[in-house]
Amino acid sequence: MEFKVTLSTEEIVRGLKHYRRIAKQDVLRAPETPNPDVFRVHAEARREVYARLAETAETDGPEAVVATALELYQNLPFVTGTSEDAYPEVKGQENALENFFLMIGLDPKVRREARKARKPVE
């Protein structure tokens, strides 16, 4: 898949840190939600993805972090259409990666190609 990255490493890391802080706030407010365990797992999964992507960006640069994110996205099972509280970890990872793609301005066509490569959940 071809993609073009217009953000610098610093911009990517700064954006990921912002997303990570939001996810941490969500972890902290999970007990106040109707389904605390699902909410917490979803938020923790997002935090882990943001941390991993930030680390990749810092060590390997913008192109490598986008390639890593696309690979992670393709390897996620396709869980869209499952019940709201099913697969919170997968849905959290998916949400984090999709937020990342929006942040960097990834061409929606590239994201759709990666999404098509995903296998249904077993």
Image (cartoon, rainbow, N blue to C red):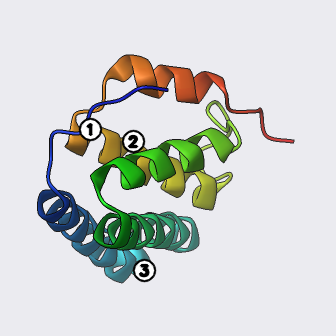
* Residue at image mark 2: 98
Can you tell which mark lies on residue 61? none
Residue 22 at x, y percent in the picture: 24, 68
* Residue at image mark 1: 102
**Cα gap from disc 3 to disc 1, whole angstroms:** 29 Å
Which comes before the other along the chain, label 3 or label 2?
Answer: 3
> With respect to residue 59, does 9 lie above or below?
above
73 or 35: nearer the eye? Answer: 73
Q: Quadrant of residue 15?
A: bottom left
* Residue at image mark 3: 31
Residue 67 at x, y percent in the picture: 46, 45
**Cα gap from disc 2 to disc 1, whole angstroms:** 6 Å
Q: Describe residue 14's horizontal placement relative to residue 59 as left or right.
A: left
Q: Describe residue 76's horizontal placement relative to residue 73 as left or right.
A: right
Residue 45 at x, y percent in the picture: 51, 67
What is the crowding at mark 3: few (fewer than 14 residues within 10 Å), some, or many (at least 20)?
few
